[in-house]
Structure formats: C-alpha cells, structure tokens
Image: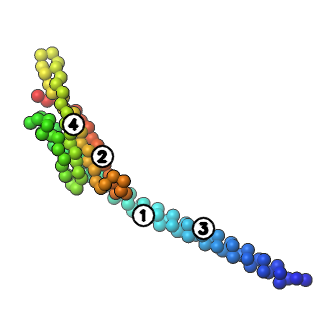
C-alpha cells in the first residue's frame, strides 16, 4: 500500500508533457509570425520588381534612341530611373546585305534596386537588337 510513491512519478511525467507542449506552441507561433511577414512583403516585392523591369525597359528605349540618332558610344551610360540604377551598354557591328550596309546595335540594360545580398535587392536585365543606318 504505497500509494504516495506512484503519485510522485506521475507528477514528473506531466511536467515533461507540459514543457514539450509549450515548446511546440512557441515554435508554431514563430512560424506564423514569419509567414505573416512574408505575406505582407510579397506584394511590395512584386511591385518593385515591375518598377525595376520598366526602368530597364526605359534604359533600352533611351539607348536605342541614342544609337540610332548619334552613336552607339553615346548610349553607354548609367542612368537613375524611378529610383533604380540602370546601366545601358551598346555594341555595334556592320551588316552587309546585297548592296546595302546596316549597323546592328546590341543593347543591354541592367536595372537594380538595393545592394546585392540584401533582402530588398531586385534586378532585371533586358537585351535588344536594333538595326539602323
């Protein structure tokens, strides 16, 4: 008839279960807070990605204008468009077809926001080929 001995063993077992349950609930809370933060930032990154893409596209259009109305060397520059840094490069090569000679311009625009490795870094690259005089 040693009842008090079994009560002491059950009390320790309940403490282990309570600690395990507390750790699991804390972990689930951290996961929920993290997912909430990701969900709130996703539309922001989508918007910044679209804005960066259009900045690169503007760089291509600017480079095309400079290449066709001046020289390819005038198109090589760094611009700031809508908060994005856009590096525009241009290379030209002559192309002969029959009696006509054309220049083929290879344009590239690299737009970026933030610094590489940061959580808010976004970049887009667009390339185009344009034929002109």
Q: Quadrant of the N terminus?
A: bottom right
Label 3 secondary element = helix
Left or right placement of residue 1 versus residue 117 in this view: right
Label 1 CA crowd tier, 10 Å (few <14, some 14–19, many 20+): few
- As measured in the structure, the alpha-carbon distance from the residue carrying label 3 to the one carrying label 1 is 20 Å
Q: Nearer the viewer, residue 129 or 74?
A: 74
Of tags 1 and 2, the one toward the viewer is 2
Residue that mark 2 sits on: 124
Residue that mark 4 sits on: 107
- As measured in the structure, the alpha-carbon distance from the residue carrying label 2 to the one carrying label 3 is 41 Å
Label 2 CA crowd tier, 10 Å (few <14, some 14–19, many 20+): some
- As measured in the structure, the alpha-carbon distance from the residue carrying label 1 to the one carrying label 2 is 24 Å
| Comes first in the chain, label 3 or label 1 | 3
| Comes first in the chain, label 2 or label 3 | 3
Whole-percent x, y for residue 22 in the image: 61, 72
| Comes first in the chain, label 1 or label 2 | 1
Q: Quadrant of residue 19?
A: bottom right
Location of residue 2 with respect to 76 vertically, above or below: below
Whole-percent x, y for residue 57 in the image: 23, 44
Q: Residue at x 14, y 35 (%)?
A: 72
Residue that mark 3 sits on: 24
Residue that mark 1 sits on: 37
Label 1 secondary element = helix
């Amino acid at each position: 008839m040693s009842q008090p001995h079994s009560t002491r063993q059950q009390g320790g077992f309940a403490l282990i279960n309570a600690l395990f349950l507390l750790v699991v609930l804390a972990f689930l809370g951290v996961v929920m807070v993290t997912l909430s933060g990701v969900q709130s930032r996703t539309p922001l990154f989508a918007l910044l990605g679209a804005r960066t893409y259009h900045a690169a596209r503007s760089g291509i259009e600017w480079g095309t204008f400079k290449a066709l109305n001046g020289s390819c060397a005038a198109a090589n520059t760094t611009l700031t468009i809508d908060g994005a840094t856009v590096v525009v490069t241009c290379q030209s090569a002559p192309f002969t077809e029959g009696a006509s000679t054309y220049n083929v311009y290879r344009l590239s625009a690299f737009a970026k926001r933030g610094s590489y490795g940061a959580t808010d870094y976004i970049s887009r690259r667009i390339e185009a080929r344009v034929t002109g005089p």
